[in-house]
Image (tube, rainbow, N blue to C red):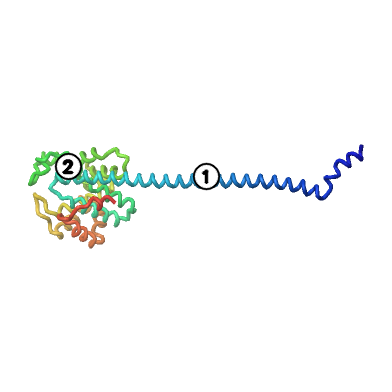
């Protein structure tokens, strides 16, 4: 029996037979390796395709979001212009005061993103004038006390128009509309806020708006000389205006003069100059 068993396994000990067995196993390993490699390559290609698809979708979402924001801000600016058309002021007023506001923000050291938001929101400061009767809004002369009380409501009207929006620009616009007539000493309206109780955007726009109002002609007044207007701003620093905003306004004074010269009342207004 021992001899038979030895004879049965003897072929496996022959060198050629061992090579045949080893070669067969190697072929199986190679076939399995190639199959797995192909699967891995296919999976890798699929992953790359998915990544490319995700990247493309992200780009499309980004483009769509940017387009929505652009359209939103264009509509807001056109609405701001609608308020200006009801007012004796010109469309150039909202450009000048927006640029003055950004000038102040820049000199206060605010970030580019905050400067941009202020620049886009500032033109909405008087949007509430849409709710003021023409007989008061367009009156060529000083308002009677009871008329002025109605005029002051435009700050609240503007806030009501813009409040509760998911847009950061509209939120800023609502804040500016409500607070740009507040005064640093607490004597402003509509809430009589003082100092830093007044949001920074409101304090900035207060300087920009009043300066432009003083230096431009209106149906009820002539434009003030530059020296008189600057004297008024300086004299009212700490009273009407935040001293920090006044200092920032007069810093780089040549820039203020350039804005006034570039955006005069006969300037051809372009939506793209605020929607950026």
Tell me the element at label 1: helix
Q: Residue at image x 74%, y 48%?
A: 23
Q: How many marks?
A: 2
Q: Residue tagged by mark 1?
A: 46
User: Which badge, 2 or 1, comes first in the chain's sequence?
Assistant: 1
Would residue 197 be visible to someone looking at this image?
no
Q: Position of residue 241 (x, y in %)?
A: 22, 51
Tell me the element at label 2: helix
**CB atoms at circles 2 and 1 under 8 Å apart?**
no
Q: Nearer the viewer, mark 2 or mark 1?
A: 1
Q: Position of residue 110 (x, y in %)?
A: 32, 53
Judging depth in this view, the residue of 143 and 194 nearest the camera is 143
Q: Residues within 10 Å of mark 2 (few under 14, many from 20)?
A: many
Check the picture and name the quadrant holding the N terminus. top right
Question: Is 47 on the left-hand or right-hand side of 8?
Answer: left
Would residue 192 be visible to someone looking at this image?
yes
Q: Residue at image x 42%, y 45%?
A: 58
Question: Is 226 on the left-hand or right-hand side of 25?
Answer: left
Q: For the view shown, which residue lies furthest in the bottom direction?
A: 254
Judging depth in this view, the residue of 16 and 122 nearest the camera is 16
Q: Position of residue 158 (x, y in %)?
A: 22, 41
Please identify the quarter of the rendering in which residue 229 is found.
Answer: bottom left
Q: Residue tagged by mark 2?
A: 129
Q: Residue at image x 23%, y 59%?
A: 250
Q: Residue at image x 14%, y 41%?
A: 151
Judging depth in this view, the residue of 72 and 241 nearest the camera is 72
Q: CA distance from mark 2 to mark 1?
A: 59 Å
Q: Residues within 10 Å of mark 1 (few under 14, many from 20)?
A: few
Q: Position of residue 103 (x, y in %)?
A: 26, 56
């Amino acid at each position: 029996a021992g001899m038979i068993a030895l004879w049965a396994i003897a072929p496996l000990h022959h060198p050629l037979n061992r090579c045949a067995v080893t070669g067969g196993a190697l072929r199986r390993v190679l076939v399995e390796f190639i199959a797995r490699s192909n699967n891995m390559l296919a999976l890798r290609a699929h992953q790359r395709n998915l990544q490319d698809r995700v990247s493309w979708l992200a780009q499309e979402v980004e483009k769509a979001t940017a387009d929505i924001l652009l359209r939103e801000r264009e509509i807001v600016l056109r609405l701001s212009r609608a308020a200006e058309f009801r007012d004796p002021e010109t469309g150039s007023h909202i450009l000048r005061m927006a640029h003055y506001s950004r000038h102040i923000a820049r000199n206060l050291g605010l970030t580019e993103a905050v400067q941009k938001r202020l620049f886009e929101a500032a033109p909405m400061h008087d949007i509430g004038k849409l709710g003021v009767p023409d007989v008061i809004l367009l009156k060529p002369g000083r308002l009677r006390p009871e008329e002025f009380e109605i005029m002051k409501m435009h700050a609240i009207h503007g806030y009501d128009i813009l409040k509760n929006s998911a847009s950061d620009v509209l939120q800023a616009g609502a804040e500016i509309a409500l607070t740009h007539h507040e005064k640093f000493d607490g004597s402003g309206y509509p809430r009589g806020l003082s100092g830093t109780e007044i949001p920074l955007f409101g304090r900035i726009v207060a300087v920009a708006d009043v300066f432009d109002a003083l230096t431009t002609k209106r149906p009820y007044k002539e434009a003030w000389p530059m020296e008189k207007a600057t004297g008024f701003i300086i004299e009212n620093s700490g009273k009407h205006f935040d001293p920090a905003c006044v200092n920032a306004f007069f810093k780089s004074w040549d820039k203020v003069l350039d804005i006034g010269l570039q955006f005069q009342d006969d300037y051809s207004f372009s939506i793209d100059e605020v929607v950026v």
